[in-house]
Amino acid sequence: MRQMSDELRRHLDDDGRGERLRAGFHIAIIGEPNVGKSSLLNTLAQRDVAIVSSLPGTTRDIVEVHLDLKGFPATLFDTAGLRASDDPIEAEGMRRAKQRAAEADLRVLVVDAQVPKVSPAVSGLLTEGDLVVANKCDLLGSADHLAPSPISANESLTFMPMLLSAKHGDGVDGLIDHLTELVSNGLAGGDGVFLTRARHRKALEETTQAIDRSLQGRLETPELLCEDLRIAARSLGRITGRVDVEDLLDVIFADFCIGK
Ligand SMILES: Nc1nc2c(ncn2[C@@H]2O[C@H](COP(=O)(O)OP(=O)(O)OP(=O)(O)O)[C@@H](O)[C@H]2O)c(=O)[nH]1
Ligand SMILES: [Mg+2]
């Protein structure tokens, strides 16, 4: 029983991966204005979702698309370009962009490959495991392709940008492969059994608690021990789909007031 309880606890301790698997991995595209964030979103979505223009500050609202990364669900968010601005609407767009960046599972920072620099306020949004892409690589001379400059988020966190052209497609397959790997690592792990619904998690918690109670020296009261094991089996049955007659009667009496 103890072994079973430990095993169930391992499933519960999955860092919410299962729920994320269901909701999809959240990826925020961030960066300064005009670097090609919306172009990248459109390229990855393979449709013209976000407005692209040569005017910096085009995107204000967050634009969201759902992606299927080789079977793994992800939601991609295009955000407003980050810069100093007195325009209250743009400022609100930037506030939302930063919030979405903080909430996302993964951030993709886009920089312009020709000027691969970014203000510390923007690179400071990155955390370990994020990605940096240097876009518009089609505008580079051939020598520049060899050594993209690293981007530092802080003294101890530096990123090597992936060269890319959102407009012409160079490097996009490589980026998709990389994103797929990150998303699958983020969602998978462990033994591949996930709790994809909150009610499954709750039922498994009840199962574990009932088993633990049964293990706490109830041998002298076998009727209580049996009751806990019955509760454990019922809670587990809610996940596996096994419903017994007692369950049905409980629902009928509780929900339909029959026999009351
Ligand atoms: N040459 C070239 N131009 C690009 C590339 N990607 C984007 N552009 C151009 O760069 C300009 C800005 O692109 P957007 O995708 O609107 O840039 P953004 O980062 O979303 O800009 P904001 O919404 O203002 O923050 C447009 O004129 C695009 O056509 C690229 O890979 N190569
Ligand atoms: Mg944009």
Image (cartoon, rainbow, N blue to C red):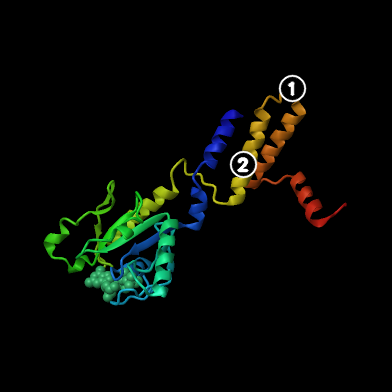
Looking at the image, residue 153 sits to the left or right of residue 19; the answer is left
Q: Residue furthest left?
A: 143
- The residue located at (81%, 51%) in the rendering is 253
Looking at the image, residue 104 sits to the left or right of residue 5; the answer is left
Mark identifier at residue 220: 1
Q: Residue furthest right?
A: 260
Circle 2 sits on which residue? 205
Above or below, 117 relative to 18 = below
- The residue located at (47%, 40%) in the rendering is 191
Name the amino acid type tagged 1.
Answer: Glu
Quote the CA–CA distance across marks 2 and 1.
25 Å
Disc count in the image? 2
Residue 57 placed where, x, y %? 34, 74
Residue 89 placed where, x, y %? 42, 74
Looking at the image, residue 160 sits to the left or right of residue 92; the answer is left
Name the amino acid type tagged 2.
Answer: Glu
